[in-house]
Image (tube, grey):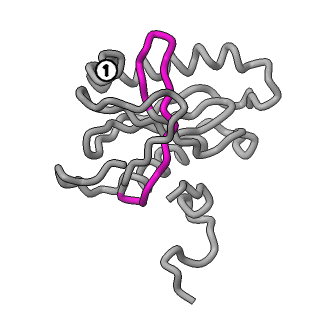
Amino acid sequence: MIADALLSDLDDEELVRRLEGFWRAADTRMSTLPVHNPALAVMVTPLRRFGRFRFAAVVTPWCMAVVAVPDTGIKLPPDGVTLRLDLPAGEVDFVVASMEDGGRYGTASLFSPMDEFDDQVIAEEVALAALDELLGETEPSETASLSVNLDRRRLLGFGRGTSDGGS
């Protein structure tokens, strides 16, 4: 699908600028809603690569999410369909969406609404830490499957017990 290539053809700096512009435009529309946290602004982290996707965490005044942008040649399912990606932290479900101009990506919510945050710096630090936890430091093999429902409390170290089923 040609539309999928619109974002994947951009270099990292251009892609971050494009994502920031997209969410800033949405911020204008969201600013009058009760979920809008005026203490926060739109910020997109530097991109990280895993497999055939580039990932960024996005902070907005109404949500924090991880965005997955596929490499050229990967056809995403239709908008609204869940795309499950196998990341170092486990399987994460991304909902496929499109920008107004046809750029397509997947998004996985970390926080919504953002009323737990009253400081931009803290929100940005949490976004970076979440991306680090999801992607780790390892490089995937070329044959890694890209197909845990994301528990934000466990992801950020707030969960109780372990996830390995120990009694």
Q: Position of residue 65 (x, y in %)?
A: 55, 39
Boundaries of the magenta span: 88-105
The residue indicated by pointer 1 is 1
Query: Residue, x 53% and y 42% (percent of image)?
Result: 108
Q: Position of residue 122 (x, y in %)?
A: 60, 44
Residue 106 located within the stretch drawn in magenta: no
- Which image quadrant is residue 24 in? top right
**10 Å crowding of disc 1: few (<14), some (14-19), many (20+):** few
Query: Residue, x 55% and y 21% (percent of image)?
Result: 23
| Residue closer to the observer: 139 or 86 | 86
**Figure check: 137 above or below 128:** below
**Figure check: 43 above or below 152:** above
| Residue closer to the observer: 127 or 88 | 88
Q: Where is the C terminus found, in terms of image quarters?
A: bottom right
Magenta stretch, overall SS: strand
**Figure check: 106 above or below 140:** above
Query: Residue, x 41% and y 32% (percent of image)?
Result: 77
Q: Position of residue 135 (x, y in %)?
A: 37, 52
Q: In the orientation shown, which residue stands out farthest toward the bottom?
A: 167
The residue tagged with tag 1: helix, strand or loop?
Answer: loop
Left or right of 126 on screen, residue 30: right
Q: Amino acid at mark 1?
A: Met
